[in-house]
């Protein structure tokens, strides 16, 4: 993998995250399951630093190793190689019950033989906290997740969303240094999911606890996180704020995984320092950041987000000449699938104004234009 | 269910019900009737009403002067039956739980094999298995001769014909009856709950006490009942491994119908045993009903 100038871990936009001390550190952690023919490298030399009070998200497709990394922080799996540090201390050898880390499981894993209050009290009781303190904290947690009325119900007698909240309260009650959440919202329907996203964010801000959140839903990751690590095949491809990940994807995979994107074949024309000019199809040029290894004459992949494209009738300006192939009306937006003269397809997303969508029809000759700064090049 | 369906299901069950009624209530009725008659001179009963059978369950009447005293021998046997059965239940639980846990945590394909191994003892007749144990633990048996050959002991240890040998034999015989229901419960246990407990600072012991045992309690209760009830009525094991003096209730009953020639007493003792079993079952049903109420 070629490195971008500097490191893949770029300064975040809410600058305080980098100023805070590291809470969880993975140092070139690898995990190999099985041996011989059935050997499977679930994590391959993963390094990441998660800072105190951060809402950090591990994002990636199924099987990329998100759960494995989370389970290693919790202590259910042990690294085949590398070390995991918690608040500066190596915890690789500690069992789960010695780590000040709690997990919200995807299946919730609430104890069916205990009441809602019994579940929330469990961790505190195991820590040997005095009964009065346990009772106080349980009350506080019940209030925090708005479950006071359900205190004496068994966990089989409450709804999925309520179980989710109990699982959260149970994991937060012992005030862990880090809360791990493995796709906690995936079992909920869309509406509840949106509500819980806001609720989670509120709880994180209120408690100030470091959250490590796993999801394969890019939208969820973008709306909730301070920083995101995009993973694939046991590796971290890019770490950055949602804005960075979306606007400046490091490579082809990140660009296509996070939101919709258009890929264009381009050539580097000139280079001055870190920036340079690239030539796009149809003779257009754009100024953008270049990776270290890129020199004039190199063929590179350029990306442009659909919402950064403007669609106008042909002849109105200097854009890429295209014909409208399909129009998809999406309510707030209209999506145009455009066919370039080279045969390449381009997707543009145009916001609908008060008078509805601009009157373009299938087969219309159009021009797609964009601000020169809207184009990025990819590492590979 | 529709009415017709209910009626049909009852019809389907009728042959079994008739058989059960005849097989269970017939002998029971005979036992009840015999227990209030007088013993015949050599065996059998004389059709004359008498409370003597029931009286002799707990008391002795001197043959010569009719003085009444407590039947110590019977009380000892009752006590031995109850305590040996309880201990059998305890030890099968102690041994059976780790076994069942081990099997339940094997990969799915291996489990069938392990369960199959657990059931192997059922393939051989109980009497033969019990004689095999006797062969191992008797004074000239394998255990003693090995220990002596190793120079660990000078003289054989008396293992056979003790309460301990009866207990060991019963634990051996009833262990599978404990393992199977325990396994059924543990198999249904969601091991993610165990992980959740570890995550919430529970040590291994705490996980066992606070999560696993409460969740597999139905299996523990079922296994205990399945072991305790037949233990209480055990006949072959105490007979072979306990000899003549370490009797349990069943052996005492057999004695009354055989050499003792006191059928009414035997019948009264049988019903006493049944009462013990009923108490255990009521305890079980109540426990299960409590479980249901708590979800
Ligand atoms: N205990 C295990 N034994 C063998 N292979 C495993 C084990 N746990 C995970 N794996 C493998 O490691 C890889 C990563 O698994 P992991 O559960 O971390 O993925 P994930 O990113 O959480 O995926 P998902 O989004 O589907 O939950 C997968 O290929 C998986 O099959
Ligand atoms: Mg997962």
Image: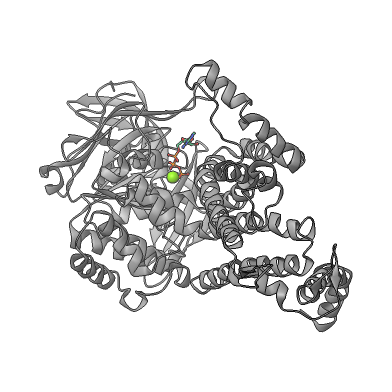
Q: Residue placed at 35% from the left, 33% from the top?
A: A78
User: Where in the figure is residue B48, as x and y percent of width and height?
Assistant: 83, 79
Left or right of residue B148, residue B43 in this image: right
> Of B156 and B280, which appears nearest the observer?
B156
> Which residue is at the far front?
B64
> Which residue is at the far bottom?
B3
Q: Is residue B145 visible?
A: yes
Left or right of residue A98, residue A41 in this image: right
User: Where in the figure is residue B50, as x and y percent of width and height?
Assistant: 76, 79
User: Where in the figure is residue B194, as x and y percent of width and height?
Assistant: 42, 50
Q: Is residue A218 visible?
A: no
> Of B94 and B239, which appears nearest the observer?
B239
Left or right of residue A339, residue B207 in this image: left
> Of B189 and A250, which appears nearest the observer?
B189
A354 w.r.t. A333: above or below: below
A104 w.r.t. A239: above or below: below
Total label count? 0
Q: Residue placed at 76% from the left, 70% from the top?
A: B264
User: Where in the figure is residue A36, as x and y percent of width and height?
Assistant: 52, 19
Q: Which quadrant of the figure has residue A251?
A: top left
The quadrant of the rendering that contains the N terminus of chain B is: bottom right
Q: Residue placed at 63% from the left, 31% from the top?
A: B138
């Amino acid at each position: 993998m070629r490195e971008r100038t500097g490191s893949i871990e770029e300064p975040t936009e809410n600058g305080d995250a980098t100023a805070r001390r590291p809470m969880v550190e993975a140092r070139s952690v690898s995990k190999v399951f099985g041996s011989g023919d059935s050997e499977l490298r679930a994590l391959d030399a993963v390094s990441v630093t998660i800072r105190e009070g951060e809402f950090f998200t591990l994002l990636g497709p199924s099987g990329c190793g998100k759960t494995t990394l989370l389970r290693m922080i919790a202590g259910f799996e042990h690294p085949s190689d590398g070390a995991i540090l918690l608040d500066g201390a190596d915890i690789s050898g500690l069992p789960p019950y010695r780590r000040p880390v709690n997990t919200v499981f995807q299946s919730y894993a609430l104890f069916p033989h205990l009441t809602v209050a019994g579940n929330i009290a469990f961790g505190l009781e195991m820590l040997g906290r005095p009964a009065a303190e346990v009772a106080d904290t349980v009350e506080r947690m019940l209030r925090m997740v708005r479950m006071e009325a359900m205190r004496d119900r068994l966990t089989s007698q409450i709804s999925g969303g309520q179980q989710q909240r109990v699982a959260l309260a149970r994991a937060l009650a012992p005030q862990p240094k880090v809360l791990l959440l493995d796709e906690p919202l995936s079992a909920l329907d869309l509406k509840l999911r949106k509500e819980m996203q806001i609720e989670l964010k509120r709880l994180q801000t209120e408690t100030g606890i470091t959250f490590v959140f796993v999801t394969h839903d890019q939208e969820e990751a973008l709306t909730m996180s301070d920083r995101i690590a995009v993973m694939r095949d046991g590796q971290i491809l890019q770490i950055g704020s949602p804005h960075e990940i979306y606007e400046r994807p490091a490579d082809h995979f990140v660009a296509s995984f996070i939101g919709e994107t258009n890929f264009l074949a381009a050539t580097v024309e000139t280079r001055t320092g870190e920036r340079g000019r690239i030539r796009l199809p149809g003779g257009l040029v754009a100024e953008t950041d270049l990776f270290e290894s890129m020199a004039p004459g190199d063929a590179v992949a350029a990306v442009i987000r659909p919402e950064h494209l403007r669609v106008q009738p042909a002849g109105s300006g200097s854009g890429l000449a295209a014909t409208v192939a399909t129009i998809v009306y999406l309510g707030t937006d209209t999506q145009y699938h455009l066919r370039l003269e080279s045969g390449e397809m381009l997707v543009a997303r145009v916001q609908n104004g008060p008078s509805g969508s601009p009157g373009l029809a299938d087969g219309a000759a159009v021009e797609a234009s964009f601000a020169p700064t809207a184009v990025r090049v990819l590492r590979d | 269910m529709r009415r017709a369906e209910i009626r049909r299901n009852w019809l389907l069950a009728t042959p079994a019900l008739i058989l059960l009624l005849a097989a269970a209530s017939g002998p029971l009725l005979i036992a009840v009737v015999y227990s209030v008659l007088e013993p015949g001179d050599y065996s059998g009963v004389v059709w004359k009403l008498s409370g003597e059978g029931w009286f002799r369950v707990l008391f002795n009447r001197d043959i010569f002067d009719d003085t009444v005293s407590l039947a110590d021998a019977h009380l000892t046997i009752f006590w031995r039956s109850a305590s040996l059965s309880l201990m059998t239940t305890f030890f099968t639980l102690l041994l059976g739980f780790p076994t069942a846990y081990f099997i339940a945590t094997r990969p799915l394909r291996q489990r069938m094999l392990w369960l199959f191994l657990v059931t192997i003892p059922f393939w051989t007749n109980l009497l033969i298995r019990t004689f095999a144990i006797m062969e191992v633990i008797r004074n000239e048996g394998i255990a003693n001769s090995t220990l002596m050959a190793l120079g660990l002991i000078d003289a054989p240890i008396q293992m056979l014909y003790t309460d301990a040998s009866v207990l060991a034999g019963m634990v051996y015989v009833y262990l599978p009856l404990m393992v199977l229901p325990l396994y059924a419960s543990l198999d249904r246990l969601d091991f993610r709950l165990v992980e959740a407990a570890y995550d919430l600072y529970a040590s291994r012991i705490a996980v066992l006490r606070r999560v696993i045992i409460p969740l597999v309690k139905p299996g523990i209760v079922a296994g205990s009942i399945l072991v305790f009830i037949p233990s209480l009525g055990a006949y072959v094991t105490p007979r072979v491994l306990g000899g003549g003096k370490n009797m349990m209730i069943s052996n005492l009953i057999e004695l009354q119908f055989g050499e003792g020639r006191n059928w009414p007493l035997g019948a009264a003792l049988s019903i006493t045993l049944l009462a013990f079993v009923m108490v255990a079952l009521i305890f079980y049903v109540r426990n299960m009903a409590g479980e249901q109420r708590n979800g």
